[in-house]
Image (cartoon, grey):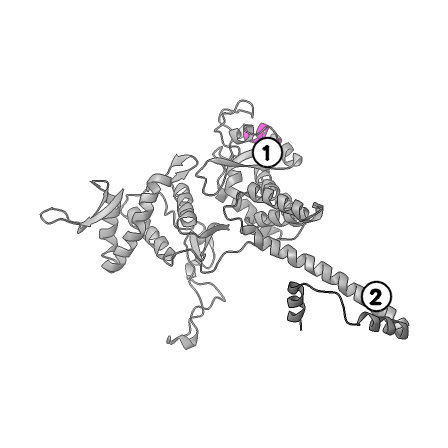
Amino acid sequence: MYWYALKPKGVKSKYELLVFKNDIVFMPLTIYFDYISKKISKSSANTYLNKLIPFFNWLIEKGMYRGEKVKWDSEPDGLRAVIEDYLTHEMFCKVREKESFNIVNLTKKSPNTIKVFLSAFKSFYNCLIRLEYYKYTNPLIDSFAKLNPNYSEGVRENKPRLPEISGTEEEIKYRRLTNSYFKVVNEEWEPQIIDDSTLPYQVYNALKNSNVPLVIVIVTRMLFETGARVSEIIELTIGDFRARRSFQEAVTFNKGSFGKRIKFIRFSKETVKLLKQYVEGQRKTLDKNSLGFETLPDNAPMFLNSKGCPLKYHTWYYHWTKSLKENKLAINPHKTRHWFVTTRLREIYSISKNDAEIDIRKNELINYMKWRNKDTIYVYEHYFDELRHREAHDKMLEDMQNKEREFNKNPNIKAAKLIEHLTPMTVELDEDLKDLLEGLD
């Protein structure tokens, strides 16, 4: 376990504070504290260190990515994955993909130190990269940030930061761009309702018009058809497909399952045809041994890039963004997941004969999506409750219009009948109904 102590008296060391892993000095954190305490106040340096130590201890037990242990000096992809797990399960945040970075939404259970934790981590890797202790790029930095045309200016247009009333000498009419991979939003997360039945076909058409590689098309189709996250599709292996009896299914991991295949996904026969075409065609030519589905090992990645290496999110995202932009569309990939849930719920409500069937099918959907918090579905339900209310209300208004026309044709007869209906009721009402009627007065 990691812990720290001030340098004991009589011990020769240039470091005032020593960080230990068990009983051995852990130099990366020791050097970091010494470095950062000269840049900021010692109290702030202590705060940073106290945010990093719990994560390093957590990393020993639970830091897994693609079935392998992640260490502090692992590649950025693995570190980002375990930091996301830590934010989700230890800090109770909702983390979702957005373009080339992740949005971190705080919940009621989240501590108010999320930004401090992320700042500490970012500065830790900046320090170790500068001192040549870490050989990769900073995992806490969005590698696509510098591609933003406004990044060099350090501002975002039409995003005021401080008004004149704030007391600054000059009104600041911008907020600085952040290059952080995890961007914190101080509001509670809610799923989005995407209720456009044509959305997948708009995207498919955009990919076709831009002539993207077949692998990009397959991954995109699977997103809409399965409701899975992008990483859960891109990181599929040959063995994940062999693990299911049906050609239309595969097993995959879930956020927080640390690489364990705990759920399955299902896709269309058309996508299966494209997948077979890809594996026995383009993928075979890219594979260094030119192997097809039957001879590939279980751990072989299903999707490869143009160099024959495992397909990465950034490669897929580049084609997604480029093709959609060329076709005047702007869609976050994570919205495919919201679209899937909205569409499935619409189907559940339309084919179920009663509330019992609706509940059974909703529980099946919750289990398929592997939601840890079953309350997630309530937001979607609220949408459909409102939708059904509108439909019922429209029917009532339509009936009112018809009766109004009927009344206007012969008002005398209708008025007499109306008076009969307004006579006091003599039916005995139960107490709950009485309270309800009194509440309507």
Q: In this view, does 45 lie to the left or right of 313?
A: left
Which quarter of the image is occupied by the C terminus?
Answer: bottom right
| Span colored in magenta | 277-284
Q: Is mark 1 on a helix, strand or loop?
A: strand
Residue at image location 35% in from the left, 53% down from the top: 117
Q: Quadrant of residue 67?
A: top left
Which of 131 and 370 lies nearest the eye of the viewer? 370
Name the quarter where the N terminus is drawn: top left
Tag 2 residue: 402
Is residue 74 visible to the viewer in this orientation of the structure?
Answer: no
Residue 174, by quadrant, is: bottom left
Label 2 crowd bin: few (<14), some (14–19), many (20+), radius 10 Å: few
- Please tell me which residue is depicted at 64% across the width and 43% down the height of the picture: 208
> Is 400 on the left-hand or right-hand side of 60?
right
Q: Are marks 2 and 1 in contact (CB under 8 Å)?
A: no
Magenta stretch, main secondary structure, is: helix
Residue 143 at what x, y percent from top left? 43, 49
Q: Position of residue 289 (x, y in %)?
A: 49, 24
Tell which tag, 2 or 1, sits nearer the viewer. Answer: 2
* Alpha carbon distance from label 2 to label 1: 51 Å
Residue 182 in sight here: yes
Q: Which quadrant of the view contains residue 429?
A: bottom right
Residues 129 and 104: in front is 104
Q: Is mark 2 on a helix, strand or loop?
A: helix
Q: Position of residue 295 (x, y in %)?
A: 53, 22
390 vs 51: above or below: below
Q: What residue type is labelled 2?
A: Asn
Question: Residue at image x 56%, y 46%?
Answer: 320
Residue 195 within the segment the image draws in magenta? no
According to the picture, the residue beneath numbered tag 1 turns out to be: 249
Considering only order in the chain, which callout, 1 or 2, is on the residue closer to the N terminus? 1
Is 300 left, or right, of 200 in this rendering? left
